Amino acid sequence: MKHAIVTLRILVLYCLVGLCQVVYAALPLPKINDVNYEISVQIDPVARTIAGQSIINVKNPRDFKIMLGSAYEVTQAELNDGQLGIGREHADQPHVWSIPFNFTQQHRIVIHWKGLLSALNTQIDHQQTLGRPIAASSELGTFLPDASGWYPRVVDTLAQYKLKLQLPAGQRGLVAGRLLEESDTEQGYRAAFEFPFDAEGIDLIAGPYKVTTLTHHNIKQRPLQLRTYFHPEIQQHAQDYLVATQRYLDLYENWIGEYPFSEFSVVSSPTPTGFGMPTMTYLGVNVLQLPFIRDTSLGHEVLHNWWGNGVYPDYRSGNWSEGLTTFMADYTYKERESDAAAREMRLGWLRDFAALQPGQDEPLVTFTSRTHGASKIVGYNKAAMLFLMLRDQVGESIFQLSLQGLWSTRRFKVTSWQNVQKMFEMISGQPLEPFFDQWLNRKGAPDLAVIDVKTAASGAGHELTLTLQQSAPAYQLRVPVHIQGQQIHVLDFKDEKQTFRLTLPEQPVAVMLDPDMRLFRQLQSGEAPPILREIMVNPLTQTVLLSTQAELRKLAETLASKLQEQKPQIMAASESLSSAPILVIGLQAEVDAWLTRQSLPDMPEAVKQKGSARVWTIARKDGASVAVIAARDGAALEALVRPLPHYGRQSYLVFDGRQVIAKGIWPTEPLKIPIP
């Protein structure tokens, strides 16, 4: 009978999701500033020149602005067949055209522009690309991010578009959308694309690509064109990426709903970037050659076609899409691997959060995009754990139905955290305002402790009296408590101090508070071993450069800058240690001598292996941590510059050149409170 009731409830919820679609469809509202672009663009990657013509049609116009980057010259600009002007007074200013409201039903703006693109810098990393989006080009590749202002666009407005692209022979390019036609001859490459949905912007990519295509049939048996645009040196990986993409499309269509586009492309970049756009992902050549990328990052980027590039986050109230994508991609893969792997990822999120210093943590509603390590800890990790806790609260089937409802009603719409909350409330029938409010609008995390535990015989069993305490103001929490030798109990903990009484069949031995790390919370002493992230995100970290040789010292300073994403604060090797985290870099003999002078432990057994460099962390008695980097020589030190910043969650590593041959986290035990 219970099974029948649950099944009936799920059927009703499916109907509710369907009803949402009917209601939204039945109440069409005229779109203000309904925008459509028709763009033709010609690019010469060797000369780094661009020339474009854009027709912008705006229906139901109100006041709006059009903007084009300062790097370009406008050769023609018309509004409804009248002159519009070039939109600026000085050559170093962006072009801005303010179009006032009138009673015209439609505006037609025509703008011709040209310019010189920046030289592509293959030495920059992904963080630098995010920090300053630049339209850049070379024979190795062209990347024109939307944020660089490379084409005239209506500001803060979604738009549909058609784009025609011309490139020299030997080059191929693309933008998000459906490939309508293309030709590749000795005279050059031509292609036309269409994006028939409201889009946030246009990113253009080109390069000396070899294209491989695979036809995949989606959940409704509609054909999808899967492609790789790969540089020739990695062409051998194309088929593996296409097959992996099929697997992810099947997974997420069955989980969320039909894939919204007609194609998906994996595109290689000459720089170590990683971006997800509608219908494609743009990943570095070196990144694509890593064997684990197909099982991790690729799925994350495919999923962004639902969350982020299919349902748009409302950045004014925070970006929920990165957290949901992290939860449904990165974390889901760990859940499928094993319970232990999933727990390790949850613990990693909490360790990362524990590494933040006062002032680095912000409420989730303020997160818009990843700009540094601290922002990722909040915007990706904390948000992913929010969805984990939400699933635990509403249940697996309700959680899945809510996601399907969100997808069916919010496709190609700007969507806020409040929209997400309302969908989960409607499907679950639960008031979720307290849950979302505390995790979105408060920074920090609850600090939980067991302050009293007693047991007494009670009839045929035993009564356990358990008093919990949390930091003020109190969160509303569902706290998992493991009673050793007994089952798991979930306690509704809503006050700063609260006593619970449990009747148990046997004498309990010990209590463990959330040992599986299912709550976003402060870790207790002993739960958070030192990891590299602590010296990477702490702005107070002091760096000791042990080598006196100029070249080695410069290499060490470069490595420290990459790890900390800022210019390091250098302290002399002879100085006494302060209470700040310490990063020490040198050759092995120099490191050994410095550890002895500072009365710190010698190199641990875990890293006493063959290799060119060793990295490990030390927990000092005063609570501060030390990260040690000991290299065999200058070449070994230089080899760490690119890979080491990606291993912030590790306590120790051994490198042979750029390859990690050993890594790990110092062991911990769940906090166990014995029962007297």
Image (cartoon, grey):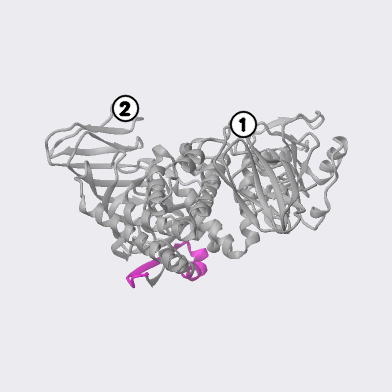
Separation of marks 1 and 2 at Cα, in angstroms: 43 Å
Question: What's the mark number on residue 358?
Answer: 1
Question: Which disc, if any, is residue 606?
Answer: none
Q: Nearer the viewer, residue 66 or 667?
A: 667
Instruction: Where is residue 626? Give x, y as percent.
Output: 75, 39
User: What residue is pinned by disc 2?
Assistant: 90
What residue type is disc 2 on? His
537 or 365, nearer to the observer: 365
Q: Which residue is most to the front?
A: 459
Circle 2: is it few (<14), some (14-19), or many (20+) Cα within 10 Å?
A: few
* Secondary structure under the numbered disc 2 in the rendered image: loop
Q: Residues within 10 Å of mark 1 (few under 14, many from 20)?
A: few
Reply yes or no: does residue 213 show up in magenta: no
Q: Position of residue 584 (x, y in %)?
A: 75, 39
Q: Residue 491 in the image: x percent, y percent? A: 60, 48
Q: Which residues are magenta?
A: 218-243
Is residue 195 visible in the rendered image? The answer is: no
